[in-house]
Amino acid sequence: MDGTRDPLTRDERAELRWLRAENTLLRVQLDILTHIATGYAHDVDTILRLRTRG
């Protein structure tokens, strides 16, 4: 290779763009699910604390 060509084919570049977009979406979904799980855990902890008081 003489260094002037893109080492990726057009299909590979398209797949790379798609994978990057998918990674972005998955990170957002993970963040949302983490917030939901944290809130759920907090709620369960609160309920258990209230039950053990009485």
Image (spheres, rainbow, N blue to C red):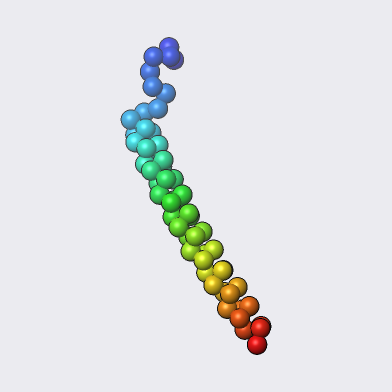
Left or right: residue 24 compared with residue 54: left
Which residue is pictured at 48% across the width and 54% down the height? 31
Tell me what residue is drawn at x 37 percent, y 32 percent: 13
Point out the image quarter for the C terminus: bottom right
Q: Which of 51 and 31 is in front in this view?
A: 51
Up the image or down, 26 lies above or below 50; here it is above
Instruction: Reply above or below: 38 against 15.
Output: below
The residue located at (44%, 55%) in the rendering is 29
Using the image as rendered, state which of residue 30 and residue 35 is in the foreground: 35
The image shows a total of numbered marks equal to 0
Q: In which quarter of the image is residue 20?
A: top left
Which quadrant does the N terminus fall into? top left
Residue 45 at x, y = what percent? 60, 73
Query: Which quarter of the picture shows residue 21?
Result: top left
Residue at coordinates 45% horizontally, 57% vertically from top-left?
32
Q: Furthest-top residue in view?
A: 2
Vertical side of 6 occupied by 17: above or below: below
User: Looking at the picture, how far across and down is residue 37, in whole percent?
Assistant: 52, 64
- Residue projecting furthest to the bottom: 54
Indicate the quadrant where residue 23 lies: top left
Residue 7 locus on image (x, y percent)? 42, 23
- Residue 44 image offset from top left, x and y in percent: 57, 74
